[in-house]
Amino acid sequence: MPIIPKFRERPGEFDDLLLIGFDKTHLEDQNYLDRMVHFFLYDYRFERVWKNPDNDIEKLSRYRAVLSPDFSMYLEMAPVMQFYNVFHNRWCGAYWASKGLRVIPIVNWGDKSTFDFCFDGIEKGSVVAVSTYMASEHDNRQDQNEWFMAGYNEMLRRIEPEKSSAITRRFQRCREILFMWTMNAVPGGI
């Protein structure tokens, strides 16, 4: 599994940090370069970063930092596809870091069987980000707090992150290590 090198946080770096969706980034952008690029989008909207990884390096390098791409890790996915998507995430993040981008790994998981690989490729003590979208009640899914907390606690145990960030509008019971980024939208969406 490729390894995303540990992100070196600078003092005050996350004060008032805002995010911008990969689909809203542009090479000509002059207004939102202080933001961190996220990939909390449908996979098809950013699949190109895996297929043609050099095409967006220049554009992404202009922003404050990037989160590694959040390839889907649905509970109902075949295990081989879950592994494949974790590999995509880590490969893109490691590659971007090798090109000088500041990368924070996204961590996600399926059921407990994915714990054998879903935390690989992230250095102990790294700053990481976690999305709570799949744990929240939406699209005829019930709230899955227990599932989320099982994975979150396993992530804390295995990675021992310096900080972890839940990207959400609401989530509770995460340890004091958690801090929140608000997904303040740029015009036209996040």
Image (cartoon, grey):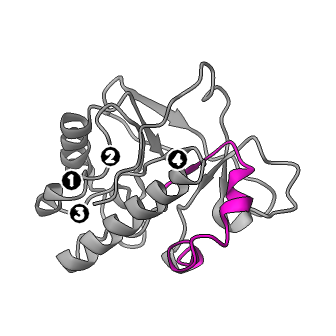
> Which one is in front in this view, the residue at disc 1 or the one at disc 4?
4
Q: Nearer the viewer, residue 153 or 168?
A: 153
Structural crowding at the residue carrying mark 3, measured as other residues with C-alpha within 10 Å and reported as few (<14), some (14–19) or many (≥20): many
Q: Which mark is residue 103?
A: 4
Q: Earlier in the sequence, mark 3 or mark 1?
A: 3
Q: Nearer the viewer, residue 184 or 67?
A: 67
Q: Which quadrant, please, contains the N terminus? A: bottom left
- Which residue was labeled with disc 1? 147
Structural crowding at the residue carrying mark 4, measured as other residues with C-alpha within 10 Å and reported as few (<14), some (14–19) or many (≥20): many
| CB atoms of marks 1 and 4 within 8 Å | no
- Which residue was labeled with disc 3? 110
Marks 3/2: CA–CA distance:
17 Å
Q: Earlier in the sequence, mark 1 or mark 4?
A: 4
Percent from the top left, x then y, of residue 111? 17, 62
Marks 4/2: CA–CA distance:
11 Å
Determine the image quadrant of residue 161: top left
Q: Amino acid at mark 3?
A: Gly
- Which residue was labeled with disc 2? 122
